[in-house]
Amino acid sequence: MLFPYLLLAPAMIVLALIFFYPLGHSLWLSFHSLNLNRPWQGTVWVGLENYQEILTDPDFYASLWRTAYWTVGSLVGELALALAAALVLNQTFPGRAIARAVILIPWAVPTVLVAIVFSTMFNTQGIVNELLFKAGLIDDYIPWLSSTSWAMPTLIFAHVWKSFPFLTIMLLAGLQSIPKNALEEAAMDG
């Protein structure tokens, strides 16, 4: 009966090396102080001082807010856009196969290229400001990427544009796995 467990041993060892060792080492380091300018001097036990220091630092809470803002903005944006796209692509219409291929383009574009294109588009003298100004929606050009109020929404927009196609395909696969008779029964039931 021991044989099946021996087959799992290599996978468990790799899992321990890749996941559990760094996790344990990070936890151990969190209770120690290490001078990065002189790492050869070793670590000193400080107990909970690192945690006390970080929980009293206002920069920690500002970073925590930015992380939550990015995460919620990205997830809500991606899910809303991906669900809408998946529902449209699940319908039957002429050119559906082409639309399904075209929707993958943002996901296939390298991230570096997306960063260059969006930084050029959202530059103070970029095309976004030019179009908004000519349409009369803004009176003065907006510094999208250097403004404290506009930088994060602009970055979230770029991230959502790059990432939503993958989630669209996942949702579309889920929608297509629903049996047709279940959909017909649900339509009849209202």
Image (spheres, rainbow, N blue to C red):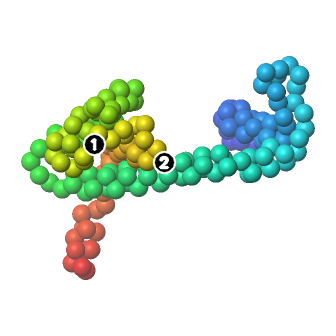
Looking at the rendered image, the disc whose residue lies closer to the viewer, 2 or 1, is 1
Q: Residue at x 85, y 37 (%)?
A: 32
Neighbours of disc 1 within 10 Å: few (<14), some (14-19), many (20+):
few
Taking the image as shown, residue 134 lies to the left or right of residue 83, namely left
Is any atom of residue 156 visible in this view? no
Q: Say which of 109 and 58 sits in front.
A: 58
Q: Say which of 23 and 119 sits in front.
A: 119
Q: Say which of 188 and 48 sits in front.
A: 48
Neighbours of disc 2 within 10 Å: few (<14), some (14-19), many (20+):
some
Local secondary structure at mark 1: loop
Is any atom of residue 123 visible in this view? yes
Q: Which residue is mark 1?
A: 140
Taking the image as shown, residue 49 lies to the left or right of residue 18, namely right
Q: Which residue is mark 2?
A: 70
User: Label 1 is placed on what type of residue?
Assistant: Asp
Taking the image as shown, residue 76 lies to the left or right of residue 189, namely right
User: Label 2 is placed on what type of residue?
Assistant: Trp
